[in-house]
Image: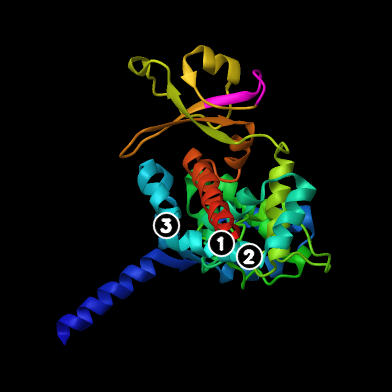
C-alpha cells in the first residue's frame, strides 16, 4: 500500500509539473493581452479570464515535436491513410454528399476527389477532429513553445477574434494538438480567411455542416491558385536507369515539362511544355518517382508535405475508383 501511495504521489507531482494554468502577469502574456485590448477593443478583464482559464499541456508539446511526415517513409505514411477501411468510409461519404461535392466542384473547378481526399486524410471523414481544447493548445504553443511562439501567438489572436465574430465560446472549442479545427482542420487564421457559409444559413459551421466543410476546402484551394482542369501529378521513370537522380524534394514546382523531358525523365502529360513541374522522390519498399504539377503544390499549402499531398491525391483516386466500379 505504501509503495502504491508513493507511486501516486510521484505521478501527481509529475502531472503538476507538466500541466499548469497561465499566469497573466508573465511579460509576454501581459503584452498579448494589452494588444488584444488596444488593437481589437477587447475588455481587459475578459481576456485575462480567458487566458488564465487555459492549461499548458506537456502532451501538446510532445505531439508537435514528432509529426509523422518527418519520421516515416512514404510507404509507411501511405499505409496509414489508404487502408481499405478508410477507402470504404470515403465511398460512404461520397454517396452521402454526392450532390454537394459535384455542385461545389463544378462551381470552383476543384476536383471532387481532392476535396474528399483532404477530408479523409485530415479527419477520417469527420471521425477524428481532435479532442484538445483549442484554447489550451494555442496558449501552450504561444507561450510555452518558444521555437514557434510568434506563429501560434498570431493564431491565438485570430482564434479570439474568430470566437467573437462567430459567437463561439473560446473555452469550449475543440481541435487538434496544434489548434486546427473541424473537419477541414483549419487553423484560426485559415478559418477567418477561407471558411465559407456554403449553404447560406447565415453561419459558418466546419464541425457539423458538410456543405460548409466542402465549400470551405474548395475555397481555400481556389484562393491558393488552384487551376481548373489541370493535371495534378503523374508517375515518372528514367529513360536510362543508370542515370537516376534523387531530386531535392521541393514544395514548389521549380522546373517545367520541357526541361524534365530533356533530362531523360519519362512521364505522360497533356500539360503544356512550359507548365511548372517538379520531379519528386518517395522512398519505401519500392522507391517511386513522380512529376508534380502546379495543382499538386497547391495541395501542399494545406499541409507543407509532399507525402501529405500524394496521400490526398491517391485516397481520392481510390475512392472514385471504387465508386466507378460500383456504378459499372
Q: What x and y, as percent, mark residue 328?
A: 59, 57
Q: Which mark is residue 83?
A: 3
Front: mark 1 or 3: 1
- Residue 57 appears in which quarter of the rendering? bottom left
In front here: 86 or 156?
Answer: 86
| Residue 128 vertical position relative to residue 303 in the rendered view, above or below | below
Report helix, strand or loop for mark 1: helix
Predominant secondary structure, magenta span: loop
Q: How far from the left and from the top, in percent, is residue 286?
A: 33, 36
- Give the labeled residue for mark 2: 95
- To which quarter of the image does residue 229 belong? top right
Mark 2 surroundings: few (<14), some (14-19) or many (≥20) residues within 10 A: few
Residue 285: x %, y % from top left: 30, 39
Q: Earlier in the sequence, mark 2 or mark 3?
A: 3
Q: Which residue is mark 1?
A: 91
Query: Looking at the image, which residue sits at the far bottom?
Result: 1
Tally of numbered discs: 3
Can residue 215 be spotted in the picture? yes
Judging depth in this view, the residue of 121 and 203 nearest the camera is 121
Q: Residue at x 32, y 68 (%)?
A: 14
Q: Find the magenta span and give its range.
A: 271-278
Amino acid at each position: 500500500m505504501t509503495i502504491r501511495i508513493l507511486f501516486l504521489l510521484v505521478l501527481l507531482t509529475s502531472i503538476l509539473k507538466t500541466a499548469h494554468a497561465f499566469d497573466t502577469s508573465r511579460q509576454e502574456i501581459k503584452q498579448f493581452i494589452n494588444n488584444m485590448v488596444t488593437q481589437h477593443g477587447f475588455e481587459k478583464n475578459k481576456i485575462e479570464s480567458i487566458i488564465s482559464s487555459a492549461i499548458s499541456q506537456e502532451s501538446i508539446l510532445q505531439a508537435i515535436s514528432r509529426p509523422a511526415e518527418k519520421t516515416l517513409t512514404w510507404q509507411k505514411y501511405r499505409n496509414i491513410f489508404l487502408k481499405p477501411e478508410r477507402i470504404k468510409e470515403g465511398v460512404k461519404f461520397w454517396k452521402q454528399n454526392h450532390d454537394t461535392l459535384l455542385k461545389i466542384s463544378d462551381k470552383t473547378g476543384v476536383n471532387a476527389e481532392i476535396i474528399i481526399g483532404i477530408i479523409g486524410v485530415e479527419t477520417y471523414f469527420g471521425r477524428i477532429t481532435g479532442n484538445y481544447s483549442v484554447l489550451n493548445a494555442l496558449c501552450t504553443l504561444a507561450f510555452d513553445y518558444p521555437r514557434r511562439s510568434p506563429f501560434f501567438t498570431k493564431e491565438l489572436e485570430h482564434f479570439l477574434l474568430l470566437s467573437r465574430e462567430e459567437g463561439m465560446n473560446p473555452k469550449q472549442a475543440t481541435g487538434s494538438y496544434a489548434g486546427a479545427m473541424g473537419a477541414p482542420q483549419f487553423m484560426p487564421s485559415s478559418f477567418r480567411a477561407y471558411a465559407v457559409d456554403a449553404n447560406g444559413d447565415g453561419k459558418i459551421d466546419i464541425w457539423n455542416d458538410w456543405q460548409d466543410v466542402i465549400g470551405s476546402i474548395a475555397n481555400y484551394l481556389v484562393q491558393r491558385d488552384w487551376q481548373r482542369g489541370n493535371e495534378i501529378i503523374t508517375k515518372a521513370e528514367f529513360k536510362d536507369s543508370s542515370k537516376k537522380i534523387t531530386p531535392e524534394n521541393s514544395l514548389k514546382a521549380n522546373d517545367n515539362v520541357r526541361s524534365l523531358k530533356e533530362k531523360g525523365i519519362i512521364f505522360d502529360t497533356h500539360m503544356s511544355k512550359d507548365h511548372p513541374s517538379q520531379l519528386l522522390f518517395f522512398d519505401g519498399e519500392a522507391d517511386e518517382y513522380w512529376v508534380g504539377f502546379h495543382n499538386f503544390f497547391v495541395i501542399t499549402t494545406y499541409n507543407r508535405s509532399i507525402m501529405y499531398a500524394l496521400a490526398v491525391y491517391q485516397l481520392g483516386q481510390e475512392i472514385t475508383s471504387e465508386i466507378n466500379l460500383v456504378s459499372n
